[in-house]
Amino acid sequence: MNNNIRQSEKSPAETSVSLTKLPETEFEVMSAVWKNTPPITTAMLMNQLGNEKGWKLQTLITLLNRLTERGFLHSEKTGKERTYYPCIKQEDYIQYETNLFVERYHANSLFQLVSAFTGNNKLSKAEIDELNTWLKNQEEE
């Protein structure tokens, strides 16, 4: 599995970032960053996450610093405010975590994943059709 992802548009360098699985709180911060249009300020994130999670400003700053050190965020000082830009696209990170999950729990088998997901439940005709369409598209690529 390739853990190197190109950084998104607004980053200081055109280098690759080696992805690591984020702890839940850091993922929550990244989710908030991805929901907003960059640049995102500390105040914007505090308004959103401080109220939602009950976090203090210092907690958020610590998490933002960790994400910046890991290469998930790029930050710039603009006057008194610090602004943040995502260096990783949400889709790329979700794909990375999904691949980790399938690799760890389902031996890299899509069939095992779908079997575990459906369990004893039968798939609907619409779901089967959707899967068949997806499989045909995969075959053509």
Image (cartoon, rainbow, N blue to C red):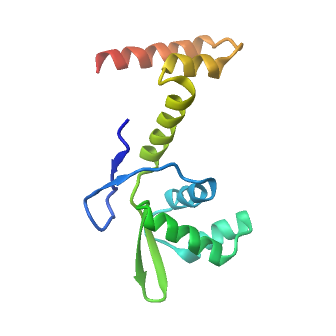
Up the image or down, 57 lies above or below 130; here it is below
Residue at 44% from the left image edge and 44% from the top image edge: 91
Residue positioned most to the left: 14
Q: Quadrant of the C terminus?
A: top left
Q: Quadrant of the N terminus?
A: top left
Up the image or down, 135 lies above or below 35; here it is above
Up the image or down, 42 lies above or below 14; here it is below
Dividing the picture into quadrants, the one containing residue 140 is top left
Residue positioned most to the right: 54
Dividing the picture into quadrants, the one containing residue 112 is top right
Left or right of 141 on screen, residue 104? right
Give percent across and percent down for residue 48: 64, 67
Residue at 46% from the left image edge and 13% from the top image edge: 132
Give percent across and percent down for residue 95: 45, 39
Left or right of 2 on screen, residue 36? right
Q: Nearer the viewer, residue 141 or 20?
A: 20
Count the numbered circles shown.
0
Give percent across and percent down for residue 29: 57, 61
Give percent across and percent down for residue 70: 44, 62
Residue at 63% from the left image edge and 77% from the top image edge: 58
Residue at 59% from the left image edge and 54% from the top image edge: 23
Up the image or down, 118 lies above or below 75; here it is above
Residue positioned most to the bottom: 79
Dividing the picture into quadrants, the one containing residue 121 is top right
